[in-house]
Every structure is written in structure tokens, then in C-alpha cells.
Image (cartoon, rainbow, N blue to C red):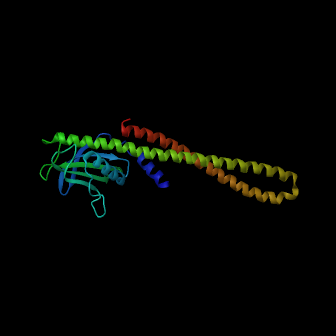
Amino acid sequence: MKNQILTLFIFLNLAAVAQEPLTGSVSYKNQLYDAAIISFPASTDYIKDAWEDFAKDRFGQKPKGHGFLANKDVLRIEQEIIEGLSTQEANLYAMIITDATGATSLRVFMNLGKDHKVSPNNANDALFEKLKKSVQDFAKSTNEDWYAEVLDNERDAIKDAEKELKRTTRDLEKAEKNLEKNTEEIQDLEQEVLDLEAENLQLSDTIEKKKDAKTGLAQKLEERRRNLDRLIQERDKATGN
């Protein structure tokens, strides 16, 4: 849970996730390609798994490159008919890395053979636009799924924090009542003063700890509520809802 919270805080500080892919250059095997580029708050492994599923459903092919001893940064569909993109054998590459901002960067590029790169600057510019549209569709559906998971986790964490705060408040009230009762008994029963004072020391320690715990839990609960609000806003931006 602590790791999830830390990850959540990191990504809350990132810029809003772009909805539409940008066009940029990617170097792969000593060649430059025009690529559709988009960033995600999710981890690289999450995006790799999601791209594998998306490619299988959208293009009719499962990419290679996510297995043992493979190039784990580039998922590849090579020398295959790519449904919805190409009626001839083509190569489709998805480079998935962590960029300088700490976000996951997906960079998708394609060629129809070694000397026929898909680019917005040549005769297959329409194909490049189809490629960008596929990346945009992937980003929308993936962000929706990822934020749904994150928001569910955050709501569950808030519920747990509320329960813990309630339990701590109950324990505090009980300790305070016991302290008050014992103080009155001390005044009436001189012979029990020493025993009751010893018990009071323990109760006082319990009260301080519970007060500290209550304060800390209340702060965490408020932070999580603010995080939930920011996540919902970020989700809306990221998914276009």
C-alpha cells in the first residue's frame, strides 16, 4: 500500500496526459522513423501488457519482444498483414520506455519494408494518420482502465482510513472516560491512590498515542480525499470525459 501511495503522489505531479499523439522522431536500429508518440502515467509494464492485448484485438497480431531475453523496450509485429492498417506485409513497432519526466512514453512507428517507412511526409501519410488514430484509441481505452483501477484503490484506501480513524476515536474516548473515572476514585479512595496513579500513567500514555494517531489519520484521510478529487479531474482530462 505504501508503494501504491508513493507512485500515486509521483504521478499526480506530472503534467496532464496528452490525449492526442504527437509526431516525433525515433531511432531504431540506426535508422530514424517518424512515430506517433504519447505519454502515460501507468508503468511501462502496464502499457506493454495493454499494448499486447490492444494489438491482438485491433491488428489481429500479438507483438513479440516482451518475453525472456527479448528487447523489452520494443514490441514488434514483423512481416505480417496488420488488420486495419496494411493489406500487405508490414512491420509495426511500439517502443515503450520511461521518459525524462518519469512518465511512460509509447512511440509507435511502422514500415512496409526496409526502404518504405510510414511517414506523414511521403505518399503513405494517410497510413500514418491511421497509425496515429490507433495510438489515440489505445491511449483513451488504456487511460480509462488505468484510472479506474487507481480510483478504486484510492477509494478503498479512504474507506480503510475512515474505519481506522473511527476505531482510534472510539479508543480515545474510552481511555478519556476511564481516566476521568479513575481520577474521581482517587479523590474518594486514598488507599488506592498509588495503584490508580500507576494505571493513570498508562492511560495517559495511551491517550497521547491515540491523539497522535487520530491527528495523523485525519490528515491522511484529508490528503486522500484531495488526491481522489485531483485524480478524478486528471482522469477526465486524460479520457476526454
Name the residue nearer the viewer: 227 or 65.
65
Across the whole image, how many numbered discs are drawn on residues? 0
Find the residue positioned furthest to the bottom.
Answer: 69
Quadrant in which residue 71 is drawn: bottom left
Name the residue nearer the viewer: 30 or 46.
46
Q: Is residue 137 left or right of residue 92?
A: right
Q: Is residue 32 left or right of residue 214?
A: left
The percent position of residue 216, horizontal first and vertical second, equals 58, 49
Q: Is residue 188 above or below residue 236?
A: below
Residue 57 in sight here: yes
Q: Is residue 66 left or right of residue 231?
A: left
The percent position of residue 92, horizontal first and vertical second, equals 22, 50
The percent position of residue 237, horizontal first and vertical second, equals 38, 38
Q: Quadrant of the C terminus?
A: top left
Name the residue nearer the viewer: 154 or 59.
59
Residue 100 in sight here: no
Tell me the residue at 31%/49% (across/down): 51
The percent position of residue 168, horizontal first and vertical second, equals 64, 49
Tell me the residue at 18%/42% (across/down): 127
